[in-house]
Image (spheres, grey):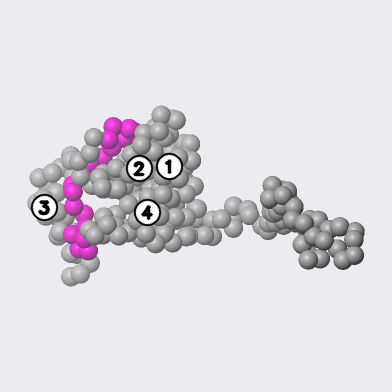
Amino acid sequence: MSKLLERGFILSTRTRPAKYFPCAPDVVSAILRNQYDRSLDRLGNALKEFPQDATTRQALAWNLTTRAEVIAKARGVIDKGTDSMFLAVWPKELRPVRVNVRNAFKRGVRITTVTYGSTNLREGHVYYHRPSDFPFRERGERRFVLTSDDRVAVIANFKSDGLGSGLWTENAGLVQLFRDFIVHEVIIIMVENAFPEQIKEFFGKDWEKLYNLPRQ
């Protein structure tokens, strides 16, 4: 009873023996709210003492263990973009982020997209890759690569059963690597469109001769 009295949850009389009465619920909730607010304020001030510079953030690469996590993180990255965005995506994964991409384009973000298959996406520069690539043929995986403002990236693989996993990072080296991969895909698409017959002759219909070189 002394603890409850000390915290202000009950009142007592000055009689002997003392009698105790509960405080009104709104009074108790106000006391608890004030206590928690003070605790959170102290916690926030304490966390400010920890280093949170760019070097610390760039060392991190966080795993995304489900498809839902990948899509949610991608939406957040797209929504925070301000300058440029590179995206390599299959139509199935483009659909849940399509509105986010459109809104980013309306904000003035420069968007370059490689899409593995047909889509009616019109925002930014869109390059159409054949609806097949090496990971899909070999492992049945659809790749997903997103970089924003040369600052943050999300990369993942999705299987035919809908499961997916990946990572997001602010590591400058990884972000540049993922962006350069998309740029490389654009170059391949442009070369293939310019010289379709020569590509088939030298490298095969699906570039299979080129992909088989490291195994010979």
Mark 2 element type: helix
Most foreground residue, 175 or 72: 72
Residue at mark 2: 97
Segment colored magenta: 121-141
Q: Are marks 4 and 3 in contact (CB under 8 Å)?
A: no
Residue at mark 3: 205
Mark 4 element type: helix
* Amino acid of disc 2: Val
Q: Are marks 1 and 4 in contact (CB under 8 Å)?
A: no
Q: Are marks 1 and 2 in contact (CB under 8 Å)?
A: yes
Q: Which residue is drawn at 59% across and 56% down?
A: 55
User: Where is the C terminus found, in terms of image quarters?
Assistant: bottom left
Find out whether residue 135 is within the magenta segment: yes
Question: Going from the N terminus, do you reach mark 4 or mark 3 first?
Answer: 4
Q: Give the CA separation, mark 4 to mark 3.
A: 35 Å
Residue at mark 4: 68
Foreground tag (2 vs 3): 2
Foreground tag (1 vs 2): 2
Question: Going from the N terminus, do you reach mark 2 or mark 3 first?
Answer: 2
Q: In this view, does 140 lie to the left or right of 12?
A: left
Foreground tag (2 vs 4): 4
Most foreground residue, 32 or 194: 32
Residue at mark 1: 78
The image position of residue 147, as x and y in percent, is 41, 47
The image position of residue 85, as x and y in percent, is 40, 41
Q: Are marks 2 and 4 in contact (CB under 8 Å)?
A: no
Residue 52 found in image quarter = bottom right
- Estimate how packed mark 4 is, as few (under 14), some (14 to 19) or many (20 or more) residues with alpha carbons within 10 Å: some
